[in-house]
Image: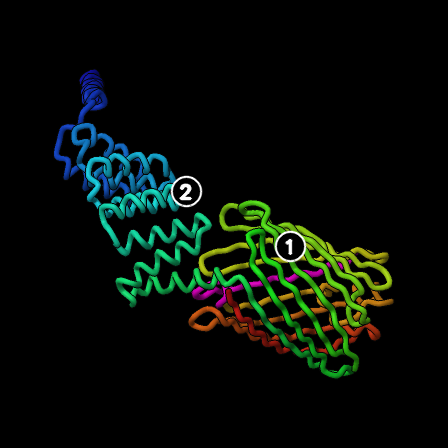
């Protein structure tokens, strides 16, 4: 027993002695290539901190082993330690400015860090060593766009296309930017509702003109509808003012002298971007007929990959209580925000969607039961200047003057928009 205990403590002390000796080692001694390979294995197996410690230890002996320092900088960038990555890339490029891959990695690091002006400066310096290089010019264009200079970004992309007119990456990016620079748009929307009983088809048309400004977008609309064998017109203005990064608003104002629309409608909503690709909003809508009906609303949205999910509730207070309704919407994007498929499901009635005039019937109509399904498909021309959309919807709606009984509403819609400078 005494022999076993003595052997055990001898082994422990020997191990601690070796560990202490290794821990006191200030400069790497060994094969840097073998250690580098082990560090790469650690990094790619979610052991980034251990990999970084190993890489830093190798650099104590081989500070100018640039491949090792470059990989260390890349791991920092992957982890979001952009300042550390910048320090390592700066060291490498200061020693050897002919390393094109490190220029590209350093520029990307600044773009990911959301410091586009620094990325632009790096791109300009890189082009001194690699004039007219397409990859670096492309990153320069991205930095220019992110610095709110899309016009300059287009000029940079033209340099790439001047060398290779078939550069698909540059062509696609230029189309996207050209679409962004289309400050004006005109469009028309049309839809028709077919009822399973009681009502004749109802027609809706909207002519709109939009303009992008540095303060946000403005859209002027003229709505025309033919319902209940009568015609009505409404004029509206929608504004989306930018407040600060990640924060913008929606403001609406509309007027009409037809009973088919509210005399006045107005509303406002505030939108805020959140981490993890979430967005939330909170606002209201007001419709003035004989009295004013106020609808409180908001939304929660989530972008994940090429998909977008959102939920929007509507709360409409009244003398008999608060009416509640809501819509869940899903979008699947393709090449950009103008090309997507959508589907939405709704429960409950909201006067935000004005199929019926509320004049004199606010309490009755707001309390109606309703279920709805809508699908849509939206696409653009190859030059992104023309956009089309088609929609189809089915609604199961309670009859306002015969509550407890329902009819079906089948909706078909088409829209077109032209963007131009």
The answer to whether residue 383 is left or right of residue 226 is left
Res 43 quadrant in image: top left
Q: Main secondary structure of the magenta part?
A: strand
Quadrant into which the N terminus falls: top left
Residue behind mark 1: 250
Question: Which x, y percent locates residue 72?
Answer: 27, 38
Q: In this figure, which residue is indicated by the disc labeled 2?
A: 115
Say which quarter of the image contains residue 59. top left
Q: Which residue corresponds to the image point at 16% horizontal and 28% vertical from the top-left?
A: 61
Residue at x 61% of width, y 58% of height: 311
Quadrant of the rendered image containing residue 374: bottom right
Q: Which region is colored magenta?
A: 322-339
Q: Is residue 85 above or below residue 12?
A: below
Decide which of 159, 359 is in the foreground and name it: 159
**Would you say 411 lies left or right of 322 here?**
left
Q: Tag on residue 233?
A: none
User: Closer to the camera, 92 or 233?
Assistant: 233
Where residue 282 sits in the image (x, y, percent)?
Answer: 66, 50
In this image, 258 relative to 167: left or right?
A: right
Q: CA distance from mark 1 to mark 2?
A: 28 Å
């Amino acid at each position: 027993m005494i022999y076993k205990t003595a052997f055990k403590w001898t082994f422990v002390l020997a191990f601690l002695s070796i560990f202490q000796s290794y821990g006191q080692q200030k400069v790497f001694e060994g094969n840097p290539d073998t250690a580098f390979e082990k560090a790469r294995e650690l990094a790619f197996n979610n052991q980034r901190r251990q990999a970084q410690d190993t890489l830093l230890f190798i650099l104590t002996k081989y500070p100018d082993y640039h491949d090792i320092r470059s990989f260390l900088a890349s791991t920092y960038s992957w982890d979001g330690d952009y300042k550390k990555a910048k320090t390592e890339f700066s060291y490498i490029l200061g020693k050897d400015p002919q390393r094109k891959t490190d220029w590209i990695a350093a520029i990307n690091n600044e773009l990911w860090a959301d410091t586009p002006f620094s990325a632009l400066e790096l791109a300009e310096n890189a082009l001194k060593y690699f004039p007219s290089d397409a990859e670096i010019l492309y990153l320069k264009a991205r930095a220019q766009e992110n610095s709110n200079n899309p016009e300059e970004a287009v000029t940079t992309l033209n340099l790439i296309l001047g060398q290779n007119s078939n550069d698909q990456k540059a062509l696609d990016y230029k189309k996207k930017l050209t679409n962004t620079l289309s400050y004006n748009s005109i469009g028309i929307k049309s839809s028709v509702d077919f009822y399973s009983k009681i009502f004749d088809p109802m027609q809706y048309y909207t002519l709109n003109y939009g303009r992008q400004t540095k303060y946000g977008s403005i859209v002027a609309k003229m709505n025309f509808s033919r319902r209940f064998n009568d015609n009505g017109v409404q004029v509206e203005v929608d504004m989306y003012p930018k407040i600060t990064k990640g924060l913008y608003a929606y403001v609406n104002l509309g007027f009409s002298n037809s009973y088919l629309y509210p005399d006045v409608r107005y509303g406002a909503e505030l939108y805020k971007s959140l981490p993890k690709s979430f967005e939330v909003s909170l606002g209201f809508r007001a419709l003035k007929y004989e009295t004013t009906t106020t609808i409180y609303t908001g939304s929660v949205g989530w972008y994940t990959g090429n998909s977008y999910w959102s939920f929007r509730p509507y709360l409409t207070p009244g003398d008999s209580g608060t009416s509640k309704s809501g819509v869940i919407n899903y979008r699947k994007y393709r090449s950009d925000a103008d090309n997507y498929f959508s589907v939405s499901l709704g429960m409950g009635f909201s006067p935000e969607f004005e199929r019926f005039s509320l004049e004199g019937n606010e309490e009755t109509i707001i309390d109606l039961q309703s279920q709805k399904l809508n699908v849509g498909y939206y696409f653009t021309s190859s030059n992104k200047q023309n956009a089309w959309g088609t929609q189809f919807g089915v609604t199961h709606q309670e009859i306002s003057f015969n509550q407890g009984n329902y009819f079906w509403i089948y909706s078909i819609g088409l829209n077109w928009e032209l963007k131009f400078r």
